[in-house]
C-alpha cells in the first residue's frame, strides 16, 4: 500500500495519496513588511551608530566599601543580630577589624575569601566614617 505521488501541472500543488497539498506563496504584504524592516534596520545602524554601541564597563566606584558593607554586613549588623558597628574604629585597632572581616569571630562568618585585601581596606575606610 504505497503512497501515490503525483505532481500536478500547476507548481502550486501536489497530489499525495489523493490529497491535494498546496504550496502557498508568501503573501506579498509579508514580503513588503520584511523589506521595510530591513531598510529601517540598515538606516538605523548607519544614522544612529551611538545607539548600537556597547557601553564601556562602569568606572571604578568611589563608594565600593560602602556597597560591600551594605550588601554583606548590614543584614546582621543593622538588625540587632550582631553588634552595632558605629564607632568600631575607635574601639578596635585596624588590624583586628580587618582580621575579623577576613577570618570571622564568634557567630560572624569569615568573608575574607569573598573579597580582596583592597576591598577589605575600602570597607575599613568606610567604617571610619560610619556612625
Image (cartoon, helix red, strand yellow):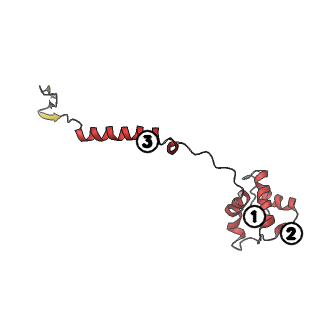
Give x and y (percent) for residue 5: 15, 27
- Tell me if residue 83 comes above or below residue 111 in the rendering: below
Q: Is residue 78 left or right of residue 23?
A: right
Q: Which residue is mark 2?
A: 90
Element carrying mark 3: helix
From the image, state whether disc 3 or disc 2 is nearer to you.
3
Residue placed farthest to the bottom in the image? 80
Q: Which residue is mark 1?
A: 108
Label 3 vs 1, first from the N-terminus: 3
Q: Are the two marked residues, 3 and 1, in contact with CB atoms closer than 8 angstroms?
A: no
Label 2 vs 1, first from the N-terminus: 2
- Tell me if residue 76 comes above or below residue 103 in the rendering: below
Q: Are the two marked residues, 3 and 2, in contact with CB atoms closer than 8 angstroms?
A: no
The residue carrying pointer 3 sits among few (fewer than 14), some (14 to 19) or many (20 or more) residues within 10 Å by Cα, namely: few
Q: Is residue 8 left or right of residue 101?
A: left
Q: Are the two marked residues, 2 and 1, in contact with CB atoms closer than 8 angstroms?
A: no
Amino acid at each position: 500500500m504505497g503512497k501515490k505521488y503525483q505532481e500536478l501541472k500547476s507548481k502550486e500543488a501536489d497530489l499525495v495519496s489523493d490529497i491535494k497539498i498546496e504550496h502557498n506563496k508568501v503573501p506579498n504584504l509579508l514580503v513588503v513588511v520584511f523589506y521595510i524592516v530591513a531598510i529601517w534596520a540598515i538606516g538605523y545602524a548607519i544614522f544612529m551608530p551611538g545607539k548600537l554601541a556597547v557601553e564601556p564597563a562602569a568606572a571604578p566606584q568611589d563608594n565600593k566599601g560602602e556597597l560591600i558593607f551594605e550588601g554583606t554586613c548590614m543584614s546582621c549588623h543593622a538588625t540587632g543580630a550582631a553588634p552595632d558597628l558605629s564607632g568600631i574604629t575607635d574601639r578596635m585597632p585596624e588590624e583586628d577589624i580587618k582580621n575579623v572581616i577576613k577570618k570571622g569571630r564568634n557567630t560572624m562568618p569569615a568573608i575574607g575569601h569573598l573579597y580582596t585585601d583592597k576591598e577589605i581596606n575600602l570597607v575599613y575606610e568606610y567604617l571610619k566614617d560610619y556612625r
